[in-house]
């Protein structure tokens, strides 16, 4: 098989200081890796992309190439750092990748929404079919144009999160009592406190969920007020960064009776409590505008609601031992896709198919067979 090729794609400027590199800011580019089939077989291509993860080494690139599908692992301008990530800019980058493949001569292009890329792909296609995101959640214009977002021919989802705003709603730790102290804790709401035995009782789970929403609402309210204050103050910056402590407290990580599948206890990143208290975790450092775009109830990038607005064929691969997507996650995607979507279980698959090389061909074959009918 041919060696991977590098795609270097110019994109429109976006968020201020999205990169520390002056060169990148003056001429912003994104990068992708793909294996191209022979020129006479340029029929189907895919893009697998995440808002922040580096997917240039994605596990599906080579297996799909072996099945006649050019799969590009594409990075957004925010690769490795979501501090100032705006989902509305991320779909613009995805659109640049779609344009690249169309110009390269591929007849069909589809998106692979893996993990956090699922909501991104759904947001992209919903906007490609009908552009409504004319403003960011903070009110500034996006200056998106339909030509930035050429529609694709289908979406395949695998180990698919529902979207960053829903993850934050499900994962934020409600036991934090002081937003400036990562060690502050209310033991009555601490799922990691030994006094709360598993399986968790219904009363605790109800109080826990309500407190999660209350904390997230408080942060969102503060972010909106702070942003308004900054923009009403002459000479003040239009944005600022802040820290959201402890964002990995989903009871399903430790109580396997909840939303039961084949998973092992813990997090996809290891011990769930350790991840919760770590210095770098989901949404830990963010800006006001990035928080509103990604993590808040004002986010326009909710996965299922956007998927429901699309009209293209859909495929869902459920990894049955996933520690961060669950049967309820699958059901939400299936409800959004309706008659256009079908589910294929990858039995025993963990979130990244890490250490499971025997399962990667199963995932690639399911996607390839579905894509051939586009």
Image (cartoon, grey):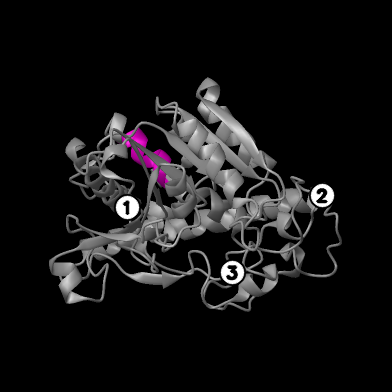
> Residue 307 got which mark?
none
Is residue 52 rendered magenta in the image?
no
Whether residue 166 is visible? yes
Q: Quadrant of residue 19?
A: bottom left
Observer-side mark, 3 or 1, equals 1
Query: Disc 2 or 3, which lies upstream in sequence?
Result: 3
Foreground: 363 or 143? 363
Q: Main secondary structure of the magenta part?
A: helix
Which residue corresponds to the image point at 58% horizontal and 54% vertical from the top-left?
214
Which residue is identified by label 2?
257
- SS for tag 3? loop
Q: Secondary structure at mark 2?
A: loop
Q: Position of residue 281 (x, y in %)?
A: 53, 69
Q: Which residue is mark 3?
A: 246
The structure residue drawn at horizontal position 66% and vertical position 66%, both measured from the top left corner, is 175
Disc 2 versus disc 3: nearer the observer: 2
Q: Quadrant of the N terminus?
A: bottom left
Query: What residue lies at 70% left-to-right and 55% top-to-bottom?
Result: 208
Cα gap from disc 2 to disc 3, whole angstroms? 23 Å
Asked if residue 169 is positioned above or below residue 6 in the image, the reply reads above
> How far apart are the two marked residues, 3 and 1, measured between alpha carbons?
25 Å
Q: What's drawn in magenta, residue-wise?
A: 120-127
Which corner quadrant of the image does residue 226 belong to? bottom left
């Amino acid at each position: 098989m041919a060696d991977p090729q590098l795609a270097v794609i110019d994109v429109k400027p976006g968020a201020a200081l999205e990169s520390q590199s002056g060169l990148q800011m003056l001429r912003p580019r994104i990068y992708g890796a793909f294996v191209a089939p022979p020129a006479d077989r340029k029929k189907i291509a895919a893009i697998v992309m995440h808002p922040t993860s580096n997917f240039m080494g994605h596990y599906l690139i080579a297996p799909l190439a072996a099945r006649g599908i050019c799969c590009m692992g594409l990075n957004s301008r925010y690769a490795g750092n979501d501090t100032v990530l705006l989902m509305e800019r991320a779909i613009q980058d995805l659109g640049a990748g779609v344009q690249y493949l169309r110009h390269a001569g591929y007849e069909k292009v589809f998106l692979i929404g893996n993990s956090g890329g699922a909501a991104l792909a759904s947001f992209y296609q919903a906007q490609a079919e009908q552009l409504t995101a004319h403003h960011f959640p903070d009110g500034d214009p996006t200056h998106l144009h339909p030509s930035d977002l050429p529609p694709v021919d289908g979406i395949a989802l695998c180990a698919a999160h529902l979207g960053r705003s829903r993850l934050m709603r499900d994962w934020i730790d409600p036991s934090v009592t002081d937003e400036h102290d990562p060690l502050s804790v209310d033991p009555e709401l601490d799922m990691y406190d030994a006094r709360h035995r598993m399986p968790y009782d219904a009363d605790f789970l109800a109080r826990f969920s309500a407190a999660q929403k209350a904390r997230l609402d408080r942060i969102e309210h503060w972010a909106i007020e702070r942003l308004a204050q900054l923009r009403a103050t002459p000479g003040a910056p239009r944005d600022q960064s802040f820290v959201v402590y402890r964002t990995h407290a989903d009871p399903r990580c430790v109580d396997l009776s909840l939303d039961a599948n084949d998973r092992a206890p813990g997090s996809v990143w290891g011990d769930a409590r350790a991840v919760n208290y770590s210095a770098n975790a989901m949404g830990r450092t963010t800006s006001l505008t990035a928080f509103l775009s990604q993590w808040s109830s004002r986010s326009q990038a909710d996965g299922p609601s956007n998927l429901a607005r699309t009209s293209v064929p859909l495929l869902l691969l459920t990894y049955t031992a996933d520690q961060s997507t669950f049967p309820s996650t699958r059901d939400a995607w299936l409800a959004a896709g309706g008659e256009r979507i079908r589910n294929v279980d990858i039995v025993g698959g963990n979130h990244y198919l890490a250490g499971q090389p025997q399962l990667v061909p199963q995932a690639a074959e399911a996607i390839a067979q579905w894509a051939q009918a586009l």
